[in-house]
Amino acid sequence: QVYKERVFDLLNPATATTLGAAGPGDDGSSAGGLRLRWDATKKAFRVENLFEFECSSAEEVMQHYVMGVQHKQVASTAMNAQSSRSHAILLVTLSRRTAIQGAEVLGDAIVAPGQAHSEVVSTLALVDLAGSERAAASHNGNTESKAGNERFKEAVNINQSLFVLRRVINALSKRAGGSG
């Protein structure tokens, strides 16, 4: 999840407990935050030290999903009793292996019978974006309380991140369309 401009692993019991109890550090520290790094070999950004689980059934995947949802940052606002205060991403990588009958030619090599298989790998990204909120509604009717001010700051961060996301999507769509 991305909460207050920091990245957290909702499937890591240690950071999930920290998030649920006191929340990430408000003093600018990265309490529990993970680092985003550039992976030159894969030519992509990745988050360091994320928990990964190998599941053999849809039920196992759902157990991890439910655990992540339970640790997600939510708060009450005037518009929603359980308003998502963060953005979250769940990546599910599906792998299907099929045995190849007989010998198979792969380039110049011949694979012996019984040892060869084909594999198809797909990645499904499920994204939950925090909803944009009007600043007045984010105070939950209480502009003087610490919680009201916290909701207001969160609403500002959420709206800013959604605005940036919109600009990124627009830039990527223009590039894909050949006009940029």
Image (spheres, helix red, strand yellow):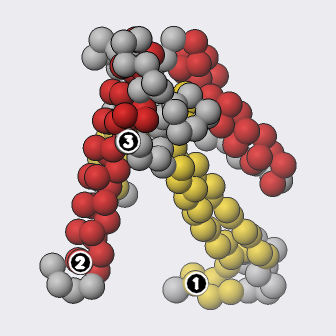
At numbered mark 1, what does the secondary structure look like: helix, strand or loop? Answer: strand
The answer for how far apart the CA atoms under marks 1 and 3 are is: 58 Å
Q: Amino acid at mark 2?
A: Lys
Q: Earlier in the sequence, mark 3 or mark 2?
A: 3
> From the viewer's perspective, is residue 138 above or below residue 57?
above
Crowd class of label 1 (few under 14; some 14 to 19; many from 20; radius 10 Å): few
Q: Is residue 23 above or below residue 135?
A: above
Q: Please state which amino acid type lies under the numbered disc 1.
A: Leu
Mark 2 highlights which residue?
174
State whether residue 84 appears in this view: no
**How many residues crowd around disc 3 within 10 Å: few (fewer than 14), some, or many (20 or more)?**
few
Q: Earlier in the sequence, mark 1 or mark 2?
A: 1
* Gap in angstroms between the C-alphas marked 1 and 2: 39 Å
In primary-sequence order, the first of circles 1 and 3 is: 1
Q: Position of residue 154 (x, y in %)?
A: 38, 30
Q: Is residue 114 visible?
A: yes
Q: Quadrant of residue 6?
A: top left
Q: Identity of the amino acid at label 3?
A: Arg
Residue at numbered disc 3:
134
Q: Secondary structure at mark 2?
A: helix
Q: Label 1: which residue?
A: 106
Nearer the camera: disc 1 or disc 3: 3
Extreme left residue here? 180
